[in-house]
Image: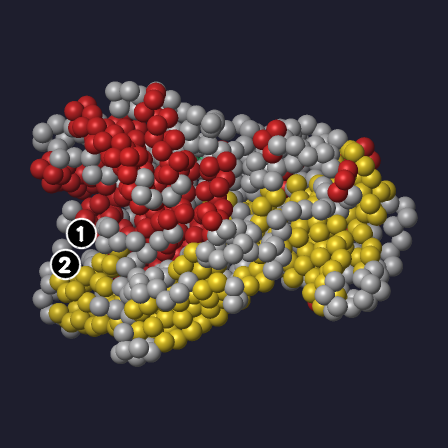
């Protein structure tokens, strides 16, 4: 039997996080591990001799909440977990986490806004840029001298806007687009970096470039800035903590602390910051980054470069003192997830000269990120322009019609010598780039950016087009998990739309470990919840988007926590107060329990190609789902009275739903696919009407192909197969006419399109929108057969049910929160072979295509059947 081995240790769903919350009680860290080897019978967690959980005889445990004495700020804690197997053997694994700051002595500083030089972006040539009123990126520097050799150094840093920090020219950390997007009026994230190796004896320099980012740049589709969404100009806060060999410490911080006017976070104004003091040794200047904007693009004028400014010895006497900004600031919180990083690079598949000094670059893959290009020596002042697009027009030129007002144009103005150009404070959604202004460009590279969620899933099968579909889904996830889960990465939108995230979440959780990423975004969702309980349409909240959430959008505030709880087993996702406030809000405005009032901008079954699902039916189905899941969440947290009240409410909504929308034959008002899908998935029908409703759904699918929009597409294949029609689910996957997934693949898609057919007005025709990619869950769960039993949490009880269709083999693996799950099956000579890996502490019910069922414990299992019957 052998020993059980812990691996993949994590603290609050991150491996070795630097700068965690200094929490106890409700915010005490969760220390978790994955399992390999034998089944565990007990565990023991010890933190640095500070706390021991004691031996816990819990064979299901994959994590323990720290419950020791208060943790100290800025402290590294090592911890270990010991697991025992049934044969008495044990095994130990170690890891660490380091707490962040709990109080700041530094204050917010900025380049004096009165000295800001506004730049009119270049308007020559083919640039679409207009006067956006963008200004040169501030550069802030502070020289300092450690008093003796430094043995450890940590930089705690954030910006209103975006920052890039260097110490003596060495980059601090590798976060991109930091500190990430939140509603900066509610909370601002900071990052922690170990910068020990950057320091030297004598004069040192901490140098930071700031950019507008989401804070004061263009964001979303409302073209107003700055000061319209959050702020007017970028600001910086930083503390560099130096520890000396003798144990003493020194802090190099932004601004004098006593100059800061503090106030309640809620009251933060978005008007101009008030300057209250000078910035205590910090100097501010401008350099070669003439402007940088997430949507418009970035311009470097190397003639204005302040060479050496990030190094000691630079003469900054002509720079101005930085100023301390004194309006109220939202609380600073440690980033709870991995930052956006440059995760990989792609070489072009082709670079084609299309005219004098003009080249068209095809990276062969639609992605989110930016282009790096080696630029040879040019005349000083010569301009190199990079434009980006997802597709080409009929004449083979960049088609930028779907970018709307996102110019997505980066510009380099040469100082003469050869250089390498890569913007740092913008990103674009593109497959193609057009580079103009250089006859012989050097190496061209696409740098892929996304929130660095660890990849956990693999899927492949005998059909190359389905493999391409899976790759497209993965790329859609990469391109849209950029600090928040966005709808698209290319046009002037890129918003955290709740429904898109809700329908895609189950797929996302299989592809990657998104626990920390969604833990962060759920704070954005809750920050955007109204005092009356209403969840929004987008989070972080942004001016210009309807505040009140639509059915299926707002409900994501309940559906997402529930799914995360089931996948990761962390009950902290279930914030019952927030979930219940939402359900109560809908109930308050809809006392007859049919959700008609306060439906926000009711987006219905968005982008459905079929007949419209009745709005009240759709809304009421989601109302029931939210009440049902909140009742379950309340029970899990032991809130019995709430659980009972919400259970009764959910039952009453169901009764009202049946009375209003269903008939005894199982027919629903509107007779649409999404109507049946929601009713079946959410358990809204009496048992005896379920089979007729499922039959009607199947008839509609057989007759019309898929007719769902965003709110039904994720349920289509799972619900059909749950009701015995996996043949139809496969038929949908095999369908080549639009609407279909294969249509996109056959038309060259490398990501998932916003619309089933990729046709329609260019203003709303994104080629990287993941909602229709939510079928990925069924590739893992249906085709390969990796699933979780309905009442199981954290993959304790697996359901392995491969549905082979006409495929000859499929393989999938999933690094679950408990350990590795794998399924591989193949057909050979009339036999069906299946290999299954069940992680320790789990059991599996294995359903073979011939109808046999096996109960198996953890470990590796193989099955063979000759009676394969597939529809
Ligand atoms: C579109 C977004 C998003 C969708 C909303 C309703 O503009 O792209 O995908 O959720 O509208």
Q: Which residue is labeled 2 in the image?
A: 870
Work out whether mark 2 precedes mark 1 in sequence or the reverse, and give the earlier one: 1
Q: Position of residue 277 (x, y in %)?
A: 81, 37
Mark 2 touches mark 1? (CB < 8 Å): yes
Between 452 and 203, the one lying in front of the other is 203
Question: From the viewer's perspective, is 64 left or right of 408?
Answer: left
Chosen colour scheme: secondary structure
> Which quarter of the frame holds ligand 1?
top left
Along the line of sight, the residue nearer the viewer: 33 or 801? 33
Nearer-the-camera pick, 542 or 857: 857
Q: Residue drawn at (74%, 69%), measured in percent from left and top?
A: 245
The residue positioned 34% from the left and 22% from the top of the image is 588
Cα distance in 3D space between marks 2 and 1: 8 Å
Label 1: which residue? 727
- Answer yes or no: disc 2 within 8 Å of ligand 1: no
Q: The N terminus lies in which quarter of the figure?
A: bottom left
Left or right: 66, with 813 as reference point: right
Q: Is residue 350 visible?
A: no
């Amino acid at each position: 039997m052998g020993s059980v081995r812990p691996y993949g240790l994590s603290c609050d769903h991150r491996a070795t996080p630097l700068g965690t919350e200094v929490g106890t009680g409700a915010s005490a860290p969760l220390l978790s591990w994955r399992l390999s080897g034998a089944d565990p019978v007990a565990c023991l967690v010890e933190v640095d001799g500070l706390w021991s959980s004691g031996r816990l005889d819990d064979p299901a445990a994959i994590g323990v909440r720290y419950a020791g004495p208060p943790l100290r700020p800025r402290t590294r804690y090592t911890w270990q977990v010991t697991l025992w197997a049934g044969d008495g053997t044990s095994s130990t694994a170690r890891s660490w986490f380091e707490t962040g700051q709990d109080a700041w002595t530094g204050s917010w500083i900025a380049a004096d806004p009165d000295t800001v030089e506004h730049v009119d972006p270049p308007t020559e040539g083919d640039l679409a840029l207009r006067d956006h009123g963008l200004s040169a990126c501030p550069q802030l520097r502070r020289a300092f001298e450690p008093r003796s050799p430094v043995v450890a150094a940590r930089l705690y840093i954030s910006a209103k806007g975006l920052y890039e920090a260097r110490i003596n020219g060495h980059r601090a950390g590798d976060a991109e687009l930091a500190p990430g997007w939140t509603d900066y009026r509610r909370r601002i994230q900071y990052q922690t970096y170990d910068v020990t190796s950057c320091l030297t004896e004598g004069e040192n320099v901490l140098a930071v470039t700031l950019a507008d980012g989401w804070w004061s740049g263009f964001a979303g589709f409302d073209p107003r800035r700055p000061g319209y969404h959050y702020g007017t100009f970028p600001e910086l806060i930083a503390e560099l903590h130096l520890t000396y060999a003798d144990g003493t410490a020194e802090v190099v911080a932004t601004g004098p602390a006593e100059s800061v006017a503090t106030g309640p976070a809620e009251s933060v104004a978005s008007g101009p910051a008030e300057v209250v003091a000078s910035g205590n040794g910090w100097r501010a200047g401008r350099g070669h980054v003439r402007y940088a904007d997430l949507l418009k693009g970035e311009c470097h004028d190397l003639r204005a470069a302040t060479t050496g400014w990030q190094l000691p010895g630079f003469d900054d006497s002509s720079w101005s003192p930085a100023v301390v900004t004194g309006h109220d600031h939202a609380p600073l919180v440690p980033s709870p997830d991995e930052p956006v990083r440059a995760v990989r690079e792609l070489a072009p598949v082709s670079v084609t000269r299309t005219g004098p000094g003009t080249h068209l670059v095809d990276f062969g893959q639609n992605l989110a990120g930016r282009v790096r290009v080696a630029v040879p020596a040019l005349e000083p002042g010569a301009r190199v322009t990079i434009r980006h697009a997802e597709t080409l027009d009929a004449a083979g030129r960049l088609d930028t019609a779907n970018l709307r007002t996102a110019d997505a144009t980066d510009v380099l103005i040469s100082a003469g010598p050869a250089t390498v150009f890569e913007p740092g404070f913008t990103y674009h959604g593109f497959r193609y780039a057009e580079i103009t202004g250089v006859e012989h460009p050097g190496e061209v590279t696409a740098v892929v950016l996304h929130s660095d969620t660890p990849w956990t899933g693999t899927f492949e099968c005998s059909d190359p087009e389905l493999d391409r579909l899976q790759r497209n889904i993965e790329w859609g996830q990469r391109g849209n998990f950029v600090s928040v889960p966005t709808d698209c990465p290319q046009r002037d939108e890129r918003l955290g739309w709740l429904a898109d995230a809700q329908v895609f979440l189950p797929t996302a959780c299989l592809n990657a470990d998104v626990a920390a990423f969604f833990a962060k975004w759920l704070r954005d969702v809750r920050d955007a919840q109204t005092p009356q309980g209403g969840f929004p349409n987008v989070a972080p909240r942004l001016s210009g988007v309807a505040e009140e959430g639509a059915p299926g959008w707002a409900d994501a505030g309940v559906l997402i926590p529930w799914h995360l709880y089931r996948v990761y087993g962390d009950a902290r996702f279930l914030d019952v107060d927030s979930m219940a406030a939402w359900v109560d809000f809908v109930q308050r405005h809809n006392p007859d329990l049919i959700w008609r009032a306060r439906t926000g901008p009711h987006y219905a079954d968005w982008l459905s190609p079929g007949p419209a699902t009745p709005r009240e039916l759709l809304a009421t189905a989601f109302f029931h789902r939210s009440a049902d899941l909140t009742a379950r969440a309340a029970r899990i947290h032991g809130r019995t009275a709430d659980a009972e009240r919400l259970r009764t409410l959910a039952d009453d909504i169901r009764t009202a739903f049946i009375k209003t929308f269903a008939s005894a034959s199982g027919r629903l008002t509107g007779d649409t696919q999404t109507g049946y899908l929601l009713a079946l998935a959410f358990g809204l029908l009496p048992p005896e009407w379920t089979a007729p409703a499922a039959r009607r759904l199947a008839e509609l699918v057989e007759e019309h192909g898929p007719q769902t929009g965003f709110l039904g597409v994720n349920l289509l294949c799972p619900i059909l197969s749950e009701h015995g029609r996996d043949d139809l689910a496969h038929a949908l996957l095999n369908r080549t006419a639009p609407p279909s997934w294969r249509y996109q693949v056959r038309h060259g898609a490398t990501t998932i399109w916003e619309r089933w057919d990729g046709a329609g007005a260019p203003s709303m025709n994104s080629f990287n929108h993941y909602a229709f990619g939510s079928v990925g869950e069924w590739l893992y769960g249906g085709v390969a057969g990796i699933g979780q039993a309905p009442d199981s949490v954290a993959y304790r009880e697996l359901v392995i049910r491969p549905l082979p269709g006409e495929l000859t083999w499929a393989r999938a693996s999933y690094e679950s929160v408990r350990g590795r799950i794998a399924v591989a099956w193949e057909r050979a000579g009339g036999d069906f072979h299946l290999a299954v890996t069940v992680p320790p502490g789990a059991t599996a019910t294995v359903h073979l295509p011939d109808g046999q069922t096996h109960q198996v414990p953890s470990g590796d299992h193989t099955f063979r059947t000759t009676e394969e019957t597939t529809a």
